[in-house]
Image (cartoon, rainbow, N blue to C red):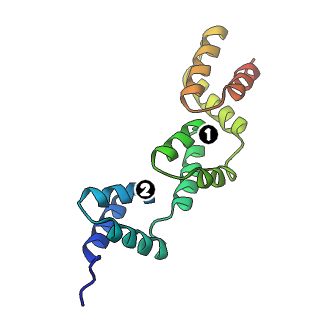
Amino acid sequence: MQDPHRALRALALKSLARRSLTVHELRQRLLRTGAEEPGVEATLAWLAREGLVDDAALAARQVELAAERAEGPLRLVASLRARGVDPDTIRAALSGAQPEAEAAARAAERYLRTHPGLDDGLRRRRLGGFLRRRGFHSDVIAEVVGEDD
């Protein structure tokens, strides 16, 4: 007897071979093909059992990447929410993150190395804007910008 979900599994595996996807993203892709919801859910359950789709692992990896890219928690949380990761999974992933003040200080260091010679007022404004766009909380930004005296 032929597996009724074989084509969905193949499509899911092809999608996952291109890039890591959350359960939500993969569900949406499979449903857009016109697949029936029970088949999609069965395929997602199979992928989860096989360890091929795991929102917690994806979120943890995104936390690691955010630290490398000097991104703050606001930007990271927004990105994970947009990808359909549930709030509890996001919280759990963030519990292992580098302290925000350290990440902001590293981002500020990197920024200031590439923008030397700015007068104090302009440096503070630009650095504050940069850190805000990177997704750091305003109290951390104020602390980092104030420490660079």
Which sits earlier in the primary sequence, circle 1 or circle 2?
2
State the residue at coordinates (60%, 44%): 67
**Disc 2 element:** helix
Badge 2: residue crowd in 10 Å (few <14, some 14–19, many ≥20):
some
State the residue at coordinates (24%, 59%): 33
Give percent across and percent down for residue 95.
69, 51
Give percent across and percent down for residue 140.
71, 29
Q: CA distance from mark 1 to mark 2?
A: 21 Å
Q: How many numbered markers are drawn?
A: 2
Depth check, mark 1 against mark 2: the one in front is 2
Decide if residue 1 is on the left or right side of residue 57. Answer: left
Residue type, mark 1 in image: Pro
Which numbered disc covers residue 2? Answer: none
- Residue with the mark numbered 2: 24
The N terminus lies in quadrant: bottom left
Image position of 68 with respect to 15: above or below: above
Image position of 137 with respect to 49: above or below: above
Give percent across and percent down for residue 104.
66, 33
State the residue at coordinates (65%, 55%): 92
Mark 1 touches mark 2? (CB < 8 Å): no
**Disc 1 element:** helix
- Residue with the mark numbered 1: 73
The C terminus lies in quadrant: top right
Decide if residue 3 is on the left or right side of residue 93. Answer: left
Badge 1: residue crowd in 10 Å (few <14, some 14–19, many ≥20):
many
Image position of 91 with respect to 129: above or below: below
* 29, 137: nearer the viewer: 29
Residue type, mark 2 in image: His
Give percent across and percent down for residue 80.
51, 47
* 145, 42: nearer the viewer: 42
* 70, 41: nearer the viewer: 41
